[in-house]
């Protein structure tokens, strides 16, 4: 009979030798057991590495979340500040509208150019209901989408309101400029200060003694007294005018033109533009005159008018 030969199982022996004089310990581990231990250690380190990586990702996300919270808080503060600025801006726009209405009344073009629906705060989103007490905060502390929507509505409305104000103020500016130009072109200041020797209307001619219509006023003043332009305009004639003597005629615009007669000196030239109050000549007694005075005529739409009806200052 053959003898059965036992296979010797392969194993690993671990010897634990202490530094002191302790007993040496010996641990024998089978080969399969050893590999199982190695596999367990590998799995442990793999799980540990995965846990560490997950922990790092969680910490990173937490840091980003904290950063986003800070940014969100800062944005909320900016939005609240923007809300207050919009409120202040809307109040200024309302004051501007009131000022415009006053200017329109002064300029004689009515109290406003808008319909009731277009008036500031009447046609806008809920009359600018962006007061701090109406700001809604959600449980998480973030601004509600309702508030953001209100802000967007108000910004759009304010942009449209600015366009309306620009258009309206542009029209008002044009009207005021026309009014200013009309006032500057209206002969409403006395060319000289003195006393009126002959008024506008029917009178007896000092030379012919016949009754005639006097189309001007005669203002007595010392010889050489400076004569001012009663209105702005373009000089259309200078020189000798027969009975008028040395004279100046100015086209003042808006239907007006003025005549200055019996001068001693002419200080402007034909084609020259003069402003109201500019010195244009000096009082004299040239032409058909009984003494130094200014013959002052005002024409409107090709007809003479009484200069005294236009004056805005007293005659001294």
Image (cartoon, grey):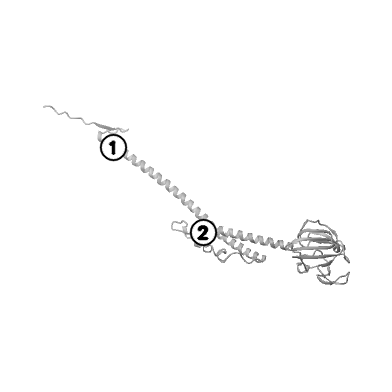
Quadrant containing the C terminus is: bottom right
Sooner in the amino-acid sequence: mark 2 or mark 1: 1
Image coordinates for residue 79, horizontal then vertical, percent: 51, 56
Describe the element under mark 1 as helix, strand or loop.
helix
Mark yes or no: residue 252 visible: yes
Where is residue 201, by image quadrant? bottom right
Q: Nearer the viewer, residue 139 or 167?
A: 167
Q: Residue at x 51, y 59 (%)?
A: 153
Describe the element under mark 2 as helix, strand or loop.
helix
Residue 182's mark?
none
Q: Which residue is mark 2?
A: 153
Q: Residue at x 49, y 51 (%)?
A: 71
**CA distance for labels 2 and 1:** 70 Å
Outermost residue on the top side: it is 2
Where is residue 24, by image quadrant? top left
180 sits to left or right of 136: right
Mark 2 or mark 1, whichever is nearer to me: 2
Q: Nearer the viewer, residue 224 or 136?
A: 224
Q: Nearer the viewer, residue 221 or 31?
A: 221
Image coordinates for residue 278, horizontal then vertical, percent: 79, 59
Residue 37's mark?
1
Q: How many neighbours does mark 2 have within 10 angstroms: few (below 14), some (14-19), or many (20 or more)?
A: some
143 sits to left or right of 166: left
Q: How many neighbours does mark 1 have within 10 angstroms: few (below 14), some (14-19), or many (20 or more)?
A: few
């Amino acid at each position: 009979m053959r003898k059965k030969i036992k296979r010797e199982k392969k194993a690993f022996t671990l010897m634990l030798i202490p530094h002191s004089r302790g007993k040496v310990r010996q641990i024998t581990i089978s080969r399969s057991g050893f590999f199982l231990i190695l596999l367990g250690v590998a799995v442990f380190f793999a799980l540990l590495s995965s846990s560490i990586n997950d922990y790092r990702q969680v910490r990173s996300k937490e840091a980003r979340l904290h950063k986003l919270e800070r940014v969100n808080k800062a944005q909320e503060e900016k939005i609240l500040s923007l809300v207050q600025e919009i409120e202040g801006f809307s109040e200024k726009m309302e004051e501007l509208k009131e000022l415009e209405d006053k200017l329109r009344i002064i300029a004689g073009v009515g109290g406003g150019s808008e319909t009731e629906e277009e008036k500031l705060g009447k046609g806008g989103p809920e009359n600018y209901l962006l007061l701090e007490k109406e700001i809604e905060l959600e449980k998480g502390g973030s601004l509600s989408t309702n508030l953001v929507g209100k802000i967007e509505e108000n910004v759009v409305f304010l942009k449209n309101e600015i366009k309306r104000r620009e258009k309206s103020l542009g029209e008002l500016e044009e009207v005021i400029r026309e009014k200013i130009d009309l006032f500057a072109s209206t002969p409403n200041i006395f060319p000289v200060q003195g006393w009126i020797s002959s008024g506008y209307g029917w009178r007896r001619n000092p030379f012919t003694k016949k009754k005639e219509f006097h189309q001007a006023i005669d203002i007595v003043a010392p010889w050489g007294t400076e004569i001012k332009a009663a209105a702005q305009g373009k000089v259309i004639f200078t020189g000798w005018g027969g009975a008028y003597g040395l004279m100046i005629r100015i086209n003042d615009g808006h239907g007006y033109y003025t005549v200055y007669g019996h001068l001693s000196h002419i200080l402007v030239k034909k084609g020259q533009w003069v402003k109201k109050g500019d010195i244009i000549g000096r009082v004299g007694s040239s032409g058909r005159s009984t003494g130094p005075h200014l013959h002052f005529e005002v024409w409107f739409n090709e007809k003479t008018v009484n200069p005294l009806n236009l004056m805005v200052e007293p005659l001294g």
